[in-house]
Image (cartoon, grey):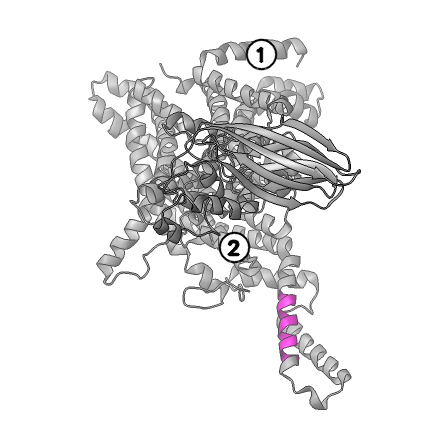
């Protein structure tokens, strides 16, 4: 029953998301409330200034601002107990109600954190998905080539390359790429997603976005496909040593058919999982690299929010990243369950 | 396990490991890094770099944004190197009430690109009068400046010619320059050392037209000591060139080679400590989960699943932005969220070990749970743990570097990420200061590479199935 499995996984994902948001709320509660308190103080002071203070005693002014303060505390739930406040925060975050930012504005000028964060999701997905698709295609082809002739020159050199780029920070490679292909040889734009001013017409626009996409994608692919090829190679190689492959070969089935018909059928599920898992790890680990290219995605938003010390945006960005990451994991499970029949039939994991 | 067993299994492992060339290469790299840490006081050109990295005055005598010295090797027109002259000729003329001290430095200039500055440093008391002049190889003598000094007891004197002799050098150059070029030059903006080291002919005031005058320059300082208590000694002439040291300097005049070397120990510490702690937690977690089974196992797997679903780096960024952690706090935070890596593999391995008969025998003999887990199950997983530790180290180093890149690192130490953060902030990418951007990142990549080589080599030995035939 695949549908049952899907529903189970989805519910499980939602529960984990709620738990994680709860943990975040507990950890960051103090800091978040401090931001809200500062905001309230500012508002109260502004109202005090606006008041015509001529016919009021200092006592009355003080009383008035205290009233206003209490009023805002009630609105922002600061008059409740700590556990209650954490719970309210959790619920708000789960429905993506993050409140207002302190400084950062969205591209339309809105101060609503949800608008600010949500407009960055498609941009990040565009960047990483493009990179991942190219990455997986090259990795898969290269990996199969490697598995066919293990120990050959190609296999050895590409394996060594995997290790060479293993600990290389993507943002550092991005910096080098920028230095080389933007400032020394001006081939690519220096950052952003579209030129200023943006070109007219949807075709020109798409072309412009692709032009801006090229260098960050190139950086990610150059770093990524080695690992993908290495994993593919190991899985295919492991499968090629199974008995059923030997028997297929013994029956005289052509090697091409053995490889693509027999070996790949078993190797496909783990390869897909590994590739997607690596993609998710790349989103989690490389997201900051958007900042180097000023690609206006979720990663760049971390840079901006850290620079401006905008805590609500930072929290909203974290919650949203967690949501995207978790959805990725759930989708991964669903694909795996679809490809590997043993999982959807058996109730156990 | 007995000592002999450990020794035996280790020598077996070493025999296998020796055959993997890439593993040996990684090990050699690792040992080089280790040696750098051990002999750090000997190899550091600036020994105090660990305490003074953010102290601007400590670095003031270095050139700003100078390229590495070895780049001269690829140039036909050599740029001036940086040097420090500490051995002047000193003459003292006692004239009764007055004392006259003449200090002269000989500087052999054989470059095409002038130094960025000439700095005279000394130590003095009272109010001596100082007159600085230079004799050029073409015989011209220029009086650079005349300055009365007012010094507290034993205070430092620092005279920068690029700043203080601007007017007199302009005066000198104007006599040789064509009228058109004088009109185009700006007396407040021209490059003083460049003019000082150029041939006295037309074009001396224009950077693009001037020609270097090679030969021996004599910088002499005449110091008139008016009172009995006036003293001035400990003279040195510092010449910050256009190229500097092994890796050049950054926009804060800091020696990058010192910074990069000082970063080695922090990277090793961060990587190894995080890897050991988090992998140990993960391995024990996996074994315990597999050993107990039942509801305890499923509860632990739920916890594992929750931790696995956290996007690590974004959370670390937000934690660092909010709590501004010190280095050890950051390592602690990484350990809390990093341990999930080995759990899945360890659990499935432990599931198999659990069913072995000797475990059953131990249980029959009355061995406790702790004894079985730590004495009979965990030791079997030690080789795997080492391999995954080695592969964890680069990740931890890159994470710390990323946190630092965002400007959230521990400000009391020097790490490669912080050097890169400064580079990014000061537009090193934009201005092509490659010697500021390449070395720290290359070190991160090299260290990651070293551990990747070691880790993959171990992995290869542990999973013989993947071995190339």
Q: What is the quadrant of the C terminus of chain B in the image?
A: top left
> The numbered mark 2 sits on a residue in which chain?
A
Nearest to the eye among marks 2 and 1: give it.
2
Secondary structure under the numbered disc 1 in the rendered image:
helix
What label does residue A319 carry, if any? 2
Q: CA distance from mark 2 to mark 1?
A: 47 Å
A37 is within the stretch colored magenta: yes
Q: Is residue B452 above or below residue B420?
A: above
User: Is A76 left or right of A201, judged from the image as shown?
Assistant: right
Front position in the image: B324 or A249: B324
Q: Is residue B332 visible?
A: no
User: Is B26 left or right of B60, judged from the image as shown?
Assistant: left
Crowd rating for badge 2 (residues with CA inside 10 Å; few <14, some 14–19, many 20+): many
Does label 1 lie on the same chain as label 2?
no
Which residues are drawn in magenta?
A36-48
Check the image and name the residue furthest to the right: B228
Query: Residue at the spot x=54%, y=35% of the render?
Result: B134
Q: Residue B140: where, in percent of width, then height?
A: 48, 35
Front position in the image: B71 or A49: B71
B366 is within the stretch colored magenta: no
Secondary structure under the numbered disc 2 in the rendered image:
helix
Q: Residue A235: where, in percent of width, then height?
A: 37, 27
Q: Residue B98: where, in percent of width, then height?
A: 74, 37
The reply to whether callout 2 and callout 1 are in contact (CB within 8 Å) is: no
Crowd rating for badge 1 (residues with CA inside 10 Å; few <14, some 14–19, many 20+): few
The residue under label 1 is: B9
């Amino acid at each position: 029953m695949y549908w049952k499995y899907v529903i189970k996984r989805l519910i499980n994902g939602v529960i984990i998301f709620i738990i994680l948001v709860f943990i975040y709320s507990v950890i960051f509660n103090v800091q978040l409330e401090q931001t809200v308190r500062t905001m309230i103080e500012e508002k109260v002071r502004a109202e005090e200034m606006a008041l015509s203070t001529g016919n009021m005693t200092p006592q009355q002014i003080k009383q008035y601002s205290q009233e206003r303060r209490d009023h805002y505390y009630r609105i922002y739930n600061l008059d409740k107990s700590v556990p209650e406040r954490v719970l309210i925060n959790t619920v708000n975050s789960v429905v993506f109600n993050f409140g207002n930012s302190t400084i950062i504005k969205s591209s339309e000028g809105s101060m609503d954190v949800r608008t600010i964060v949500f407009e960055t999701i498609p941009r990040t997905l565009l960047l990483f998905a493009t990179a991942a698709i190219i990455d997986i295609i090259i990795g898969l082809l290269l990996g199969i080539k490697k598995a066919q002739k293990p120990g050959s020159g190609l296999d050895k050199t590409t394996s060594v390359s995997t290790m060479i780029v293993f600990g290389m920070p993507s943002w550092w490679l991005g910096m080098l790429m920028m230095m080389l292909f933007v400032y020394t040889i001006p081939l690519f734009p220096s950052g952003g997603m579209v030129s200023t001013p943006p070109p007219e017409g949807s075709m020109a626009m798409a072309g412009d976005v692709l032009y801006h996409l090229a260098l960050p994608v190139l950086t990610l692919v150059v770093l990524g496909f080695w690992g993908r090829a290495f994993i593919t190679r190991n899985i295919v190689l492991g499968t090629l040593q199974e008995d059923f492959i030997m028997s297929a070969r013994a029956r005289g089935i052509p090697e091409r058919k053995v490889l693509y018909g027999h070996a790949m059928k078993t190797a496909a599920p783990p390869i897909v999982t590994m590739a997607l898992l690596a993609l998710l790890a790349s989103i989690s680990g490389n997201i900051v690299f958007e900042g180097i290219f000023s690609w206006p995605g979720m990663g760049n938003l971390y840079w901006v929010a850290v620079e401006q010390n905008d805590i609500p945006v930072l929290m909203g960005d974290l919650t949203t990243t967690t949501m995207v990451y978790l959805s990725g994991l759930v989708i991964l499970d669903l694909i795996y369950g679809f490809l590997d029949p043993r999982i959807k039939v058996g109730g156990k994991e | 396990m007995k000592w002999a067993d450990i020794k035996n299994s280790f020598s077996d492992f070493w025999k296998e490991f020796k055959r993997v060339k890439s593993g040996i290469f990684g090990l050699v790299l690792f040992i080089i890094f280790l040696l750098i840490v051990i002999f750090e006081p000997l190899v550091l050109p600036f020994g105090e770099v660990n305490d003074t990295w953010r102290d601007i005055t400590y670095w003031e005598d270095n050139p700003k944004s100078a390229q590495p010295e070895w780049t001269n090797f690829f140039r036909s027109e050599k740029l001036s190197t940086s040097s420090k002259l500490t051995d002047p000729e000193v003459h003292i003329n006692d004239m009764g009430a007055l004392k006259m001290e003449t200090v002269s430095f000989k500087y052999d200039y054989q470059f095409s690109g002038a130094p960025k500055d000439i700095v005279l440093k000394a130590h003095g008391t009272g109010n001596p009068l100082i007159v600085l002049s230079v004799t050029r190889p073409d015989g011209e003598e220029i009086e650079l400046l005349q300055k009365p000094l007012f010094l507290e007891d034993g205070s430092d004197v620092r005279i920068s010619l690029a700043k203080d002799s601007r007017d007199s050098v302009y005066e000198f150059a104007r006599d040789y320059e064509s009228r058109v070029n004088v009109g185009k030059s700006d007396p407040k903006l021209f490059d003083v050392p460049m003019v000082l080291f150029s041939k006295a002919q037309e074009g001396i005031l224009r950077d693009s037209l001037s020609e270097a005058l090679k030969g021996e320059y004599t910088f002499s300082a005449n110091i008139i000591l008016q009172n009995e208590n006036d003293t001035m000694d400990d003279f040195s002439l510092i010449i910050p060139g256009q190229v500097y040291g092994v890796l050049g300097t950054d926009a804060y005049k800091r020696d990058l080679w010192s910074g990069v070397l000082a970063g080695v120990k922090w990277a090793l510490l961060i990587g190894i400590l995080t890897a050991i702690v988090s992998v140990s937690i993960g391995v024990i977690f996996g074994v315990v989960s597999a050993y107990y089974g039942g509801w305890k196992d499923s509860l632990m797997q739920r916890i594992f699943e929750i931790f696995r679903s956290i996007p690590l780096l974004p959370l670390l960024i937000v934690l660092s932005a909010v709590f501004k952690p010190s280095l050890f706090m950051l390592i602690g935070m990484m350990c809390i969220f990093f341990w999930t890596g080995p759990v899945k593999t360890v659990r499935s391995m432990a599931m198999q070990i659990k069913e072995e008969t000797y475990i059953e025998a131990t249980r029959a003999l009355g061995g406790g749970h702790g004894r079985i887990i730590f004495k009979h199950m965990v030791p079997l997983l030690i080789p795997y743990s080492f391999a995954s530790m080695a592969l964890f180290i680069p990740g931890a180093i890159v994470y710390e570097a990323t946190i630092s890149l965002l400007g959230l690192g521990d400000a009391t130490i020097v790490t490669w990420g912080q050097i890169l953060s400064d580079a990014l902030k000061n537009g090193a990418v934009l201005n092509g200061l490659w010697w500021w951007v390449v070395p720290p990142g290359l070190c991160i990549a090299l260290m990651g590479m070293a551990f990747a080589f070691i880790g993959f080599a171990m992995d290869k030995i542990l999973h013989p199935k993947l071995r190339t035939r």
